[in-house]
Image: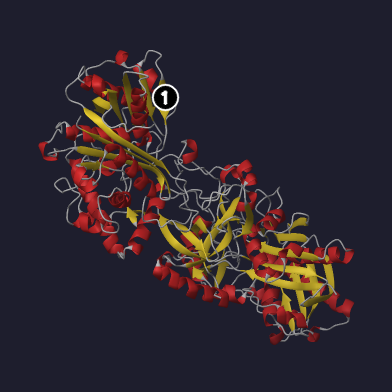
Amino acid sequence: MIGIKSFGAYVPVYRMPATEIARAWGGRGKGERAVANYDEDSITMSVEAAIDCFGDIDRKKVDALYFASTTPPYDEKLSASIVAAATDLRTDISTLDIAGTLRAGTTAIRAAMDAIKAGSAKNVLVTAADSRLAPPASEFEPVFGDGSAAFIISDQDVAVAIEDYYTLSSDFIDVWKRAEDPYIRTWEDRFILQHGYSEKMGQAVAGLLKKTGLSAADFARVVYYAPDERSHQRMAKQLKLNPEQVQNPMFGVLGNTGAAFAPMMLVAALEQAKPGDRILWASYGDGADAFVLKVTDAIKKIKGRRGIAKHLESKMQIPNYEKYVRFRNLMQGEADRRPQYISSLPMMWRDRTQVMPLHGCRCNNCGNIQFPIQRVCAYCQAKDDYVEVPLADKQAAVFTFSMDERAVEVDPPRVWTISDFDDGGRIYITMTDRDISQVQIGLRVEMTFRKIHEGAGLHNYFWKCRPIRVAGSKAAAAKKKKASTAKGA
Amino acid sequence: MAESIKDKVAIIGMGCTKFGELWDKDAYDLVIDASYDAFDDAGVGPKDIQAAWVGTVMGSTATQLSVPLKLDYIPVTRMENVCATGMESLRAAAFALVAKAYDLVLAVGFEKLKDTGYGGLPMAVQSGGSEKWHPVIGSGDSAPGRYAMAATRYFHRFGLSQEEGKRTLAKISVKSHHNGFLNPRAHLRMEVTEEQVMKAPMIAWPLGLFDACGVTDGASAAVLCRTEDARKFTDEFVTIKGFGLSTGPGMGKVRTDYDYTHWEETQRAAKQAYTEAGVKDPRKEISMCEVHDCFSIAEMITYEDLGMCEKGKAKQDIEAGELSLTGKHPFNVGGGLKSFGHPVGASGIREIFEGYVELLGKAEQPERQLKNVNLALGHNQGGNPGRFICSICIVGHP
């Protein structure tokens, strides 16, 4: 049976309280929503969710990557291939972007199922991520959130079997955005909700139940998209669901994360699920997809994911709405007389294994790990005698740092660190997602893939460090070990 | 067999422009003014010069000297070794004399920085900076950000609280501003108080505005000949006692054993220069040091790595006033990069100019004229902690 072999998710560290939006534009605000840092986009968030999803699974066994988003950073240039490179997947794999619809996440799952069924792939990584820009002062603004989810679809060792599905396609227009539009556009909600969301979602669920002979009561959990909280509640009534069946849609803590929303809700549901649970999962956008899922015993083996729950716990409030204005470049500031960032495709290409999957080198002669890769060993001068080693999954401790207030930076100060990896090697790297009052020597950090700048009209990606988001047992042990070293230094 | 350069080369004339934001001077004006000062001082003219070296980091080619001076098709070479650039011009000129390739040569350093429209230095990629530029690895970093990492670590290693560390550094800036205040050629001629330094806006934590040197236009020049010829031109001259140049392999950001609290390249260059000059105990023999204080922390660690203060104990000597004009080991008598200014390519020769002035008793203000000056040391380090090019030159009486 084809199904979900592993799952993971990512929620950016920043939360925007609705009261802060209300302060800017008036109205009342309740709850909060997750907002991507200025250096995050659908690619970086997909990398995060993918890494969370891998767990102990050998990522070299992934033979296709489907990237789903309505906000791919490039109109022309594949996002999936960038995510594949950053997550250190093989290159002899199929990469595909599925964009242009809020239903992109479930469309990608269906495409993955088809590939596996056709025998063209064994393990397909599906990522769904969105960071949609709501018009300032619109009804969307307090509702939209940013985040991502990832799944490995396989027909081996599935934790969640996908028993059946029903798909409905529709040309109905309710939200849209042309290339020249800065923000999402829409129509009067009374019309679009009635003939769009309510009608199409209802038809898809009804279609699925008819196809499978199941009724709503047969599901332990019903996980479904809705554009907003009220519509979500109405749909529960329309589908005649018991309140305990309904998966919490996380409005007020996460927000509507677009193409990633239904996938993220599913991850949240799976974090609570027991073997044998049957789940109805439905997403909406240009029609609707509905699935019958059944949780297997293998779900017990999925451990250590940060997923939704732990990522939601780990948060920082964005200091104010004005900070968000800068993060999203919503207001033109003073023209900078300083040189703009530039880039170089040959350099990015030459150094691709260092830039994308963050490989350093380990000297075959003396064993020292070094970054960037040194052809002549910095310790023993052995020439061209090294192996590449991945550093992206290594934790480190800050050896020293500075905070540059004058950097060309969206969110000053720019925190520069010299960080020493627990397992050897040192890196000169900036810190993101940080509370500057907590930055200190010895701070435990992990690596995170981010957009560095847009020099030469390119999205120039590389890694930053950040304070460890979720302390696990592994991190705590390393902290103990490192704390004693730091004292001695 | 290599020999020490000690006393083989004489500096018979020097010039230095006023340093500052020289809105009305371009690069040509600067090299003309500094060179003619040096010609007049040596009693020579441009036609007497047989070869020249011109140091500039952000500038362009050797024609930036030959064209403004209308030199007569003689060999001119542009030097660039980041902040060590000026002293490299001097070193190349001195070696050419020792090689007896020429008899009378000119070394010039200049920088014109204030035409850009913003503070700080232009981006490295456009200026041949000290480090390989990369689109994303280390992209967008800055000199203050890099030096500040050393300050953070120094405070941590030697147990200084943020307040204590910043206050110690503040005393260095107060001293340098005082020295520059007395110097008519200095850029930032003003006294500052410790509290002003402490409260100044942050540049790169923990370094604030008064921990950082100015961004300055200026030029400096020297006319040199072999010592045996010096008296043909003048009775007032100094001789070169030794050079040191250490170019690090740049492993501070790579090797985990670099501590960010010492300047290895300064230690190595000092050893070379002390050996050439025959200096056994720098604390006893060196009368004054003009050192690279692009940031206050640069100067503090340099005290220790030149052997003028014990490692980790610079704070005591700073507090005791040992490094002030009236102290046992006066540092940055001219005001340093901090107050005199730092037109990058000009700074090396400017430091030697300061030693030359003090050695010959030519300080304009009596209160800044040191007594019994025997050896004056100039020091520049280009790059950033863990990856420096350090140049040292010691001059003294013939």
Report which quarter residue B51 is drawn in.
top left
- Residue B189, x across and y down, in percent: 21, 41
Q: Is residue A71 left or right of residue B278?
A: right
Q: Which percent across, then down, holds residue B176?
A: 22, 46
From what the image shows, is residue B14 above or below residue B253?
above
x and y, in percent, of residue A435 in the image? 45, 66
* Residue hosting label 1: B77
Residue type at mark 1: give it.
Thr
B168 left or right, relative to A232: left
By what rule are the colours in the image chosen? secondary structure
The residue lying toward the viewer, choosing from B263 and B195, is: B263
Residue at the spot 29% in from the left edge and 52% down from the top edge: B304
**Closer to the camera in the image, A434 or A483:** A483
Query: Which residue does the image show at 21% across and 55% down from the upper left?
Result: B317
**At which x and y percent is residue A101?**
73, 60
Q: Quadrant of the C terminus of chain A?
A: bottom left
